[in-house]
Image (tube, helix red, strand yellow):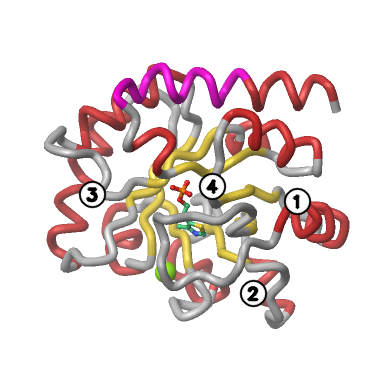
Amino acid sequence: MSDAYRLYLVTDPRLGGDRPLEQIVEAAVAGGVTLVQLRDKDAEPAAVERRARSLLRLLDGTGVPLLVNDHLSVAQTLGIGLHVGSSDSPPDLARTLLGPDVLIGASLGGGRAMPEAHWEALSYAAVGPVWATQTKRDTGPAVGTEAVERVTGSLALPVVAIGGITPARARSAVLAGAAGVAVVSDIVAAADPAAAARELREAVDAALAER
Ligand code: TZP
Ligand code: MG
């Protein structure tokens, strides 16, 4: 199951230039992305739901699951996974409403105090920013691969490293214990998102084989 976390694409509508998001996601999946999160901080729920439906059509038959950031109601309507930050819906509520079969993840910085019921509700934890990032403004300082090591050592959950990921850093993150990496700009802003994804995926696969 933790193979699903090898290369996690997190979308950002501001970074793709004038290319439709669907085009970038399709290319990235062809390049080896294993999970997709629809993340659009500015869109209304109805617009997020429309986008999610369009991505679901595109992902149909690929085996790549779609998660939505923040919007529990959209996840519920579409029966898809959910990623929550510290100020979003609590994971245990999300699990109760979404059921046992979808992926639910949460963001952690270097560590996050959460009631046990929240941890138990999660499918994975995202740790970051591991390296500095321009993509997310309201984030804490870079936590480094030490944080990945610490969290993977203390949590019985797959850990995904996020923040400033490049192929070389993907290797370091996996060697520190991550099940995979979550990437925004290295794929979404790339001139060739399929090639960017392929390079990241090769780095993750090679590091996992080395571990
Ligand atoms: N959460 C922590 S860092 C980050 C998020 C959503 C953004 C990562 O973006 P990039 O472009 O891969 O550094
Ligand atoms: Mg959030």
Q: Position of residue 64 (x, y in %)?
A: 44, 31
| Residue contact at pointers 3 and 1, CB within 8 angstroms | no
Circle 3 packing at 10 Å, graded few (<14), some (14-19), many (20+), is: some
What is the C-alpha distance between the residues marked 2 and 3?
29 Å
Q: Which element carries disc 3, helix, strand or loop?
A: loop
The residue wearing badge 3 is 13
**Amino acid tagged 1:** Thr
* Residue 178 at x, y percent in the picture: 72, 43
Q: Which residues are magenta?
A: 191-202
Using the image, determine if residue 199 lies above or below residue 17: above
Q: Nearer the viewer, residue 112 or 102?
A: 112
Question: If you read the primary sequence from the N terminus, does the residue marked by circle 3 or circle 4 appear first?
Answer: 3
Please name the amino acid that badge 3 sits on. Pro
Asked if the residue at label 4 sits under 8 Å from ligand 1, the reply is: yes
The quarter holding residue 68 reads bottom left
Kindly check if marks 4 and 2 are in contact, taking CB atoms under 8 A apart as contact.
Answer: no
The answer as to whether callout 1 falls within 8 Å of ligand 1 is: no
Identify the residue position indicated by label 2 in the image: 118
